[in-house]
Image: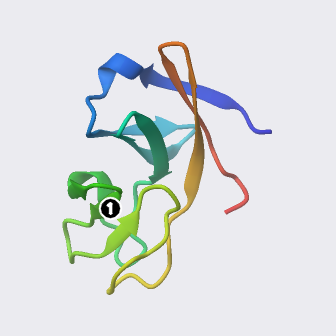
Amino acid sequence: MGELVKVCRVSDLPDPGKAVFDVNGRMIALFHVSGTFWAIDDVCTHDGGPLAEGELRGYTIICPRHGAQFDIRTGHAKTMPAVKGVTAHKVVVQGEDVYIEVNESA
């Protein structure tokens, strides 16, 4: 198990909501949807755009540059022009604190 890094409190992120955190030098987008937190790399695999600046529709984030869509729960690329998914990271909520465990294997 990797290191858990505290990024915010539950009350810091509205539901639905999104924010970006630098976790050990890696930019990670954190999403709060339907009471659950999800985290993925904040970089579109198509052209490097900042995913969290895009529109969040349910469990889908839309890249603001060219409209590629990703599932925030898995990182899976759902539409072109992205053909490769982004890395998903484990999120742990302990009380009011939200932690991210960076997926170093990807």
Q: Which secondary structure, mark 1?
A: strand
- Find residue 19 and report its horizontal and vertical position in percent: 32, 38
- Find residue 41 and report its horizontal and vertical position in percent: 47, 55
- Find residue 55 and report its horizontal and vertical position in percent: 19, 57
Q: With 71 as the anchor, is 54 left or right in this view?
A: left
Q: Residue at x 56, y 61 (%)?
A: 87
Is 65 situated above or below 83?
above
Total labels: the figure holds 1
Q: Quadrant of the N terminus?
A: top right
Q: Residue at x 43, y 73 (%)?
A: 45
- The part of the image, by quadrant, that contains residue 80 is bottom left
- The part of the image, by quadrant, that contains residue 65 is bottom left
Q: Is residue 68 visible?
A: yes
Is 94 situated above or below 59?
above
Which residue is most to the right? Answer: 1
Q: Residue at x 23, y 58 (%)?
A: 57
Color theme of the render: rainbow
- Please tell me which residue lies in front, 28 or 16: 16
Name which residue type carries label 1.
Thr
Is 67 situated above or below 102?
below
Neighbor class of circle 1 (other Cα within 10 Å; few <14, some 14-19, many 20+) is some
Q: Which residue is mark 1?
A: 60
Q: Quadrant of the C terminus?
A: bottom right
Q: Residue at x 21, y 58 (%)?
A: 54
- Please tell me which residue lies in front, 54 or 43: 54
- Find residue 28 and report its horizontal and vertical position in percent: 45, 46
Q: With 14 as the anchor, is 79 left or right in this view?
A: right
- The part of the image, by quadrant, that contains residue 14 is top left
